[in-house]
Image (cartoon, rainbow, N blue to C red):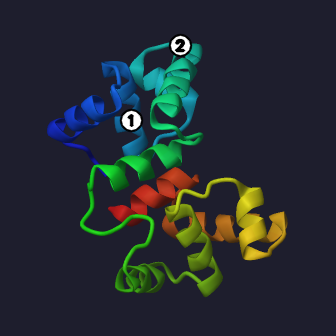
Amino acid sequence: MRLSVAQIEKIRKRYKLTKREADLVKLYFAGINDNLEISKILNISFLTAKLHVTNIYRKLSVNHKLQVVIKIIDECKLLDFDIKGPPKGLISDIQKKYNFTDREIDLIKLIFQGITANKEIDKIMNISIYTNKTYLSSIYKKIQANNKLALIIKIID
């Protein structure tokens, strides 16, 4: 999901982000969440990238890059539906398009809600960490993503 200049400015003002922090947020919306990759793209040190990430988390009161994206989408109304509870029709379309199982869809719904910790997902779905990892691996393979942030961005796009 690409953000327009106007959307970035709105986000910067709403959350009091610096220009560089907004640059990181733009990368999150492109599905990039690896700090090393971010540091290379922005031509900053790895530690500087981590500092910006920490500042963003503090300003948005979150603890994961995926939660940054979900919070911004939700609070800035960037989609025409509620990101935390997408319409059943959209979920059904996604399930058909990517051939997801019902349990994979259950896991995806939790990720849409901003639940990022595998232990929390395991507990809610009453599954083992190994089952969770199997589901995630299958989902990533089907949608050609390599992390939860990229997964959500691909689904939204």
Which of these two is toward me, 12 or 90?
12
Quarter holding residue 88: bottom left
Q: Measure the C-alpha gap from mark 2 to mark 1.
A: 17 Å
Q: Is residue 126 left or right of residue 19?
A: right
Q: Position of residue 3 (x, y in %)?
A: 25, 44
On the question of residue 43 being in view, the answer is: yes
Q: Position of residue 113 (x, y in %)?
A: 52, 63
Kind of residue indicated by mark 2: Ser
* Few, some or many residues within 10 Å of mark 1 (<14, 14–19, 20+): many
Q: Position of residue 94 (x, y in %)?
A: 42, 78
* Few, some or many residues within 10 Å of mark 2 (<14, 14–19, 20+): some
Q: Residue drawn at (40%, 21%), measured in percent from left and top?
A: 42
Residue with the mark numbered 1: 25
- The numbered mark at residue 125 is none
**Which secondary structure, mark 1?**
helix
**Which secondary structure, mark 2?**
loop
Residue with the mark numbered 2: 45
Q: Is residue 136 left or right of residue 82?
A: right
Kind of residue indicated by mark 1: Val
Q: Position of residue 157 (x, y in %)?
A: 32, 62
On the question of residue 30 being in view, the answer is: no
Q: Residue drawn at (34%, 37%), measured in percent from left and top?
A: 26
